[in-house]
Amino acid sequence: MLQECDRPIGVFDSGIGGLTVVQEITRLLPNEQIVYFGDTARVPYGTKSKESVIRFSRDNMNVLLRHNVKMVVVACNTSTSWALNILKREYAIPVIGVIEPGSRRAVAATRRKRIGVIATPSTVNSRKYEETILRMARGAKVFQKACPLFVPLVEEGWQEHRVTEAVAMEYLAAMKKNGVDTLILGCTHYPLLKTVLQKVMGRGVTLVDSAVETAHEVQNLLEKQKLMRQNQHPPKHQFLVSDEPEHFRVVAKRFLGHDLPHVQRVVF
Ligand code: DGL
């Protein structure tokens, strides 16, 4: 029988973007084993309603539970916005999202308490980042902006393309005018745009990558609950998707810089 701590960590996302979170978890915790589920049949979540995102998030949890995971990381910002509290209540294993860790980091980093959040339209509509930041830093000013074109630009591989830079200048103009000193990348795909975003915002603005902060949160939780994997055999990660795996593999290579060995299609 597998010891409880040797069970894998489950990570889900609406599609491919959650691999940025997987990358940070495996960098920080190389002995942990991961089961990743990307709901590629129903991506994007960022333009969907609250009700749909909650229903999809429950389905994703159920897929991961069939793989005997010890905890779940909701890597998708949109799912975290609408469904994290519900999933925490409904499931017996620990569930963590990406909004608290990213917000905490931003609050620690800001000098003038002027924090920007860029995210999908659905995440922005939920106002979850704003609510979380204001709970942590009363009196802070939060400026949000939905940037729906960033996701397809990243998936196209146009991370540093001049078109992406032009789009970023358009999206971020008001943010700059408002004098934010810290910008939260509130969507799984945006860490891949760091170079362009830093250039557009200027060197004085701190970019907060939720993926990095979330990996630290995973580490804290595993330590606190004595759930760190003890097995010393190299971990074998598993990648699951709800649509055909080929496209996922192509875009994953763009995200990770290397091939994913096995991507399997699952049904709900
Ligand atoms: N994973 C989503 C998020 O972080 C971005 C992609 C989508 O819209 O589904 O919000």
Image (cartoon, grey):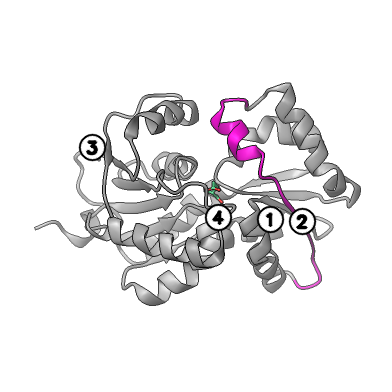
N-term-proximal mark, 4 vs 2: 4
N-term-proximal mark, 3 vs 4: 4
N-term-proximal mark, 1 vs 2: 1
The front one of 19 and 251 is 251
Assess mark 4: CB under 8 A from ligand 1? yes
Where is residue 45 shown, x and y percent of the image?
52, 52
What is the quadrant of residue 72 in the picture?
Answer: bottom left
Assess mark 2: CB under 8 A from ligand 1? no
- Which segment did they paint magenta? 138-158
Label 2 packing within 10 angstroms: few (<14), some (14-19), many (20+): many
Q: Which residue is mark 3?
A: 234
What is the quadrant of residue 113 in the picture?
Answer: bottom right
* Eye-nearest disc, 2 or 3: 2
Q: Vertical placement of 234 versus 72: above or below?
A: above
Task: Give yes or no for contact between labels 2 and 3 (Cβ–Cβ under 8 Å).
Answer: no
Q: Which residue is mark 4?
A: 77
Q: Which mark is residue 106?
A: 1
Of helix, strand and loop, which one carries label 4?
helix
The front one of 6 and 49 is 49
Q: Which mark is residue 115?
A: 2
Residue 98 visible in the current orientation: no
Q: Does the segment drawn in magenta span residue 148?
A: yes
Residue 73 visible in the current orientation: yes
> How far apart, in angstroms, are the residues tagged by discs 3 and 4?
30 Å
Where is residue 119 shown, x and y percent of the image?
65, 51
